[in-house]
């Protein structure tokens, strides 16, 4: 008997039937497999040990941090786990894994991606109206443009609307040169802040200490907050924003602790 077409996947293989009430469930979380968490100094930094055994990244590299402060904060995340390990409650560990497994050795590509964001940076695209939004954008964004003019030696062009505007010749090279002094840990934090805000300049300002993560976050959401003040808040969008804000805080904390600043 020929099966109905709907019972097959596009590739021709048989589709698995789903019994109501027995839909696919999320994979169970791994159970905590250790009792003690310690920080041990090693030749290349500070290692996290679980029951005296070195913790590993997903790619099986040693979970080694460059400063004792950052290692302690990562260790605290491991210690805080209960019967099960909840990765979503370990933002510093996740970022450290990203640095070790994906960014070290690929710093050029990460720098280039940050530079690309600066070429069409959020703070360069302004509203024409209403007057209140125009003023709010100027208040939130003009300061970081002034900082860029002073520290990066380039005055970024701004425009109204969303049509791409070219930036001054050499601006990309200056942003890239500014990032050359940043190591893989700092680049990872800056890149995460850049993608979360849509602005390399806000991320760089935060990394330079001229604004906090909260100030950069608020600046990145001027348009959204303006809409909320007029039309109210969407619950689903609010939840997404809350999760992204947690990632923003983690990036700032990683940066501060890695650089030996209070985090």
Image (tube, grey):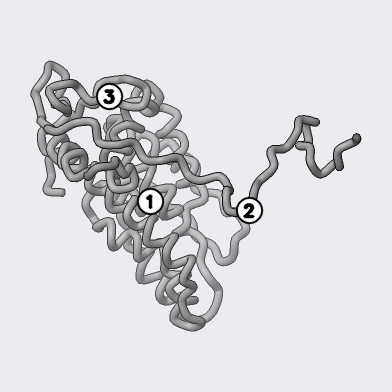
- Which residue occupies 23% across, 55% down? 210
Circle 1 sits on which residue? Answer: 201
Q: CA distance from mark 3 to mark 1?
A: 34 Å
Circle 3 sits on which residue? Answer: 56
Which part of the image, by quadrant, shows the N terminus?
top right
Q: Is residue 31 toward the left or the right of residue 160 in the image?
A: left
Q: Is residue 148 toward the left or the right of residue 159 in the image?
A: left
- Which residue occupies 43% across, 36% down? 173
**Label located before the other in sequence (3 or 1):** 3
- Which residue occupies 29% across, 62% down? 215
Residue 165 picture location, percent across and down: 57, 54
Q: Is residue 105 visible?
A: yes
Q: Contact, CB < 8 Å: mark 3 with mark 1?
A: no
**Label located before the other in sequence (2 or 1):** 2
Residue 29 picture location, percent across and down: 36, 40
- Mark 2 or 3: the one toward you: 2
Q: CA distance from mark 2 to mark 3?
A: 40 Å
- Mark 3 or 1: the one toward you: 3
Label 2: how many Cα within 10 Å (few below 14, some 14–19, many 20+): few
Residue 237 picture location, percent across and down: 48, 66
Q: Contact, CB < 8 Å: mark 2 with mark 1?
A: no
Q: Which mark is residue 20?
A: 2
Can you tell which quarter of the image residue 255 is in? top left
Q: CA distance from mark 2 to mark 1?
A: 50 Å
Q: For the view shown, which residue lies furthest in the top direction?
A: 43
Q: Secondary structure at mark 1?
A: helix
**Label located before the other in sequence (2 or 3):** 2
Label 1: how many Cα within 10 Å (few below 14, some 14–19, many 20+): many
Vertical placement of residue 23 versus 146, above or below: above
């Amino acid at each position: 008997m020929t099966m109905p077409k709907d019972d097959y996947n596009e590739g021709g293989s048989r589709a698995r039937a789903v019994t109501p009430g027995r839909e696919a469930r999320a994979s169970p979380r791994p159970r905590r497999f250790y009792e003690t968490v310690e920080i041990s100094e090693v030749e290349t930094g500070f290692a996290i040990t679980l029951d005296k055994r070195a913790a590993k990244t997903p790619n099986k590299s040693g979970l080694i941090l460059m400063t004792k402060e950052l290692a302690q904060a990562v260790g605290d995340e491991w210690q805080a786990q209960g019967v099960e390990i909840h990765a979503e409650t370990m933002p510093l560990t996740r970022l450290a894994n990203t640095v070790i497994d994906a960014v070290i050795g690929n710093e050029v590509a990460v720098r280039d991606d940050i530079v690309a964001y600066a070429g069409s940076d959020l703070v360069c695209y302004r509203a024409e109206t209403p007057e209140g939004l125009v003023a709010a954008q100027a208040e939130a964004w003009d300061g970081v443009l002034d900082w860029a003019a002073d520290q990066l030696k380039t005055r970024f062009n701004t425009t109204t609307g969303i049509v791409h505007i070219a930036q001054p010749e050499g601006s990309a090279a200056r942003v890239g040169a500014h990032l050359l002094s940043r190591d893989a840990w700092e680049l990872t934090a800056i890149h995460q802040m850049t993608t979360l805000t849509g602005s390399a300049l806000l991320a760089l300002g935060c990394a330079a200490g001229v604004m906090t993560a909260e100030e950069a976050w608020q600046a990145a959401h001027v348009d959204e907050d303006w809409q909320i003040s007029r039309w109210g808040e969407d619950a689903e969008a609010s939840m997404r924003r809350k999760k992204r804000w947690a990632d923003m805080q983690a990036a700032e904390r990683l940066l501060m602790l890695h650089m030996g600043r209070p985090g």
